[in-house]
Image (cartoon, coloured by chain):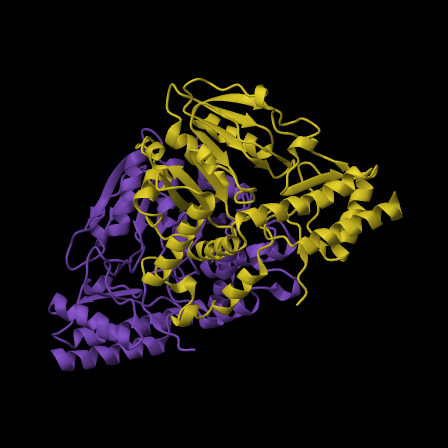
Chain colours: A yellow, B purple
Amino acid sequence: MARVYNFGAGPAIMPLDVLQEAQADLVDFKGSGMSVMEMSHRGKEYDAIHNEAIANLRELMGLNDDYAILFIQGGASLQFAMLPMNFLGEGQTADYVNAGSWGAAAVKQARMIGNVNIAADCQKDIPTRMPDAGEMKWTPGAAYSHLTTNETISGAQFKSIPETGSPLVGDMSSDILSRPLDYTKFTMIYAGAQKNLGPSGVAMVAIRKDFAGKGSISIPTMLRYQTHIENNSLYNTPPCFSIYMLCLTTRWLKKNGMQKIFQTNRDKAQLIYDVIDASGFYRGTAKKEYRSDMNVTFRLPTEELETLFIKQASEAGMKQLKGHRSVGGIRASIYNAFPAAGVKALVDFMKDFEKRNG
Amino acid sequence: MARVYNFGAGPAIMPLDVLQEAQADLVDFKGSGMSVMEMSHRGKEYDAIHNEAIANLRELMGLNDDYAILFIQGGASLQFAMLPMNFLGEGQTADYVNAGSWGAAAVKQARMIGNVNIAADCQKDIPTRMPDAGEMKWTPGAAYSHLTTNETISGAQFKSIPETGSPLVGDMSSDILSRPLDYTKFTMIYAGAQKNLGPSGVAMVAIRKDFAGKGSISIPTMLRYQTHIENNSLYNTPPCFSIYMLCLTTRWLKKNGMQKIFQTNRDKAQLIYDVIDASGFYRGTAKKEYRSDMNVTFRLPTEELETLFIKQASEAGMKQLKGHRSVGGIRASIYNAFPAAGVKALVDFMKDFEKRNG
């Protein structure tokens, strides 16, 4: 079997070990006579998977029992709405950092619910970037503050987490568990699983229980964090198979260890950034101090060359290098599970392509 | 491999063929070099799966282009809220039939949003049942009317679909595509996939486009049906693998044909009901004319005997026969994919158990 190098931004490449284990157990899970997909979500086999997934996430993020770890459907996009529905009441203000397409998407949903202060706005800046520390203006007594730790489309990433003075909420969909981090700086973290945690179909939410307890009680049951806390994410049938794959993926993360995962991620990204910096041909899209380790974005001298680059890379087994349709250019998404050999193949290809076309 | 007979109410047994095909393709889908779980939801491989799933559902339900077929996360439980959020405005009334736990759950969410008229209430009746035709009182000019076509817990099922005089919405989670039906009687149909359509993690929504167009525009983007229609359920990353499994399951349904599926379902259910009716030992829970072909519910003379029945059946490879925790008793869920041989095994066991304990 020839695995391609899948540089897609999400759904993204998964660890081969994890896929192979899921394949072996797909029809008959550990001699149970049924697939994980057929199991009752209230039975003991699934219960063990569900609770291991929670325990693994808790351990990897270093969060104690003050936090609940939840599985909610609808992706980060539904979190954009649930967050203000729960916590942005009348007469309150929430601070949002608007530093890219995903930050802007979160802002748009919050504005439908309540009053939003834009703490900093660099969404349209080129080179793409995150705001500097002194640039962000926080509202005293804000209901919460929100930031997107890594902007998947622009390729910019917060390298340190700012102090905001109010409960901090992070959309970490595209860099969750890619680096050691003091996750307790956040009151709430959410992440669609389909980049660093598993397949699509489930979002992980880590939330301080005391914060969740203050959420609105006049919104539909399924949209209250408190509902999912009280029912250990089993209020209704969860996306069992997606959570099972997340469980296997977090097991793989634990086996590797966050320090090794981070070092590998740093090394992979640096290899590509080094080629960019040594070249007059490739131009990095993001400001150097905010370059993402997850999504490396760059341009070529012309759009015609970009099209050729994507085509020839694809023919050489390097897939999905096309930048997001809203911005163009090239994007190499190299999440935790992306193999170092694939990055090596890409940088070799980049050097050769420059030689042939530069 | 020994497959168990899984009588679970959902997540439920899936066709073995479907599971085996998914297993074969799990790591490398049709030579693409990646798993379905790793594919971009905007790429051509996934696109073909997504659109085939929609086309299969459309064909099986016999719905033309006046209807959109959508995939939405959050299960039927989120539909309980989305429906009134979209369509139950101020000064309007929605009619709800309250004939079981799931009907009641839908009512509860609608009441948080707007004014509800209970068209008929037989939720607590024993024997369990659906309301009779003359019993339901519809509101002239109602925003919509809602019913649960099959109550999974009580084991009662509508055998014909009432005329309600307003746009009819059906929660068909537990009997979707189990029988030929004039689906055009409904303005909207929703169903969690994990009983008759595939695994958990996705709900199917079929909705008339003209009705959807009248939905509220002041609710969050992800909660508007119109959003999902305009984006062919690709507004954000969909639950790709669940939709893939639904695609394979609908392919299996098409191969069998609705008429054969229905006849098999009828025959399976009748086998169990015949044993019940011939016995003074087993008592059916539902009124005869409303007995469900999907969830056969019955009691034994004592709770002790029920516990013993469940235990011995489980030892004989017949799993999850325990009634819902809210009502007790025995429940045999025998959805489309449940094999006739499993029903035969159950009725043999029932007869033998009665002989030994009657």
Above or below, A52 against A216 in this view is: below
Which residue is nearer to you in this view: B339 or A75?
A75
- Can you say which quadrant of the picture contains the C terminus of chain B? bottom left
Q: Residue at x 48, y 67 (%)?
A: A26
Relative image position of residue A237 (x, y in whole percent): 36, 53
Query: Percent x, y for residue B184?
Result: 42, 53
Tell me if B93 is positioned left or right of B301 in this view: right
Q: Position of residue B65 (x, y in %)?
A: 53, 50
Residue B274 x/y as whole percent: 22, 75
Q: How many marks?
A: 0
Residue at figure coordinates x 20%, y 65% from the top left: B288
For the N terminus of chain B, the image quarter is bottom left
Observer-nearest of A252 and A257: A257
Residue A86 in view of the camera: yes
Q: Is residue B215 visible?
A: no
Left or right, A151 with respect to B304, comes to right
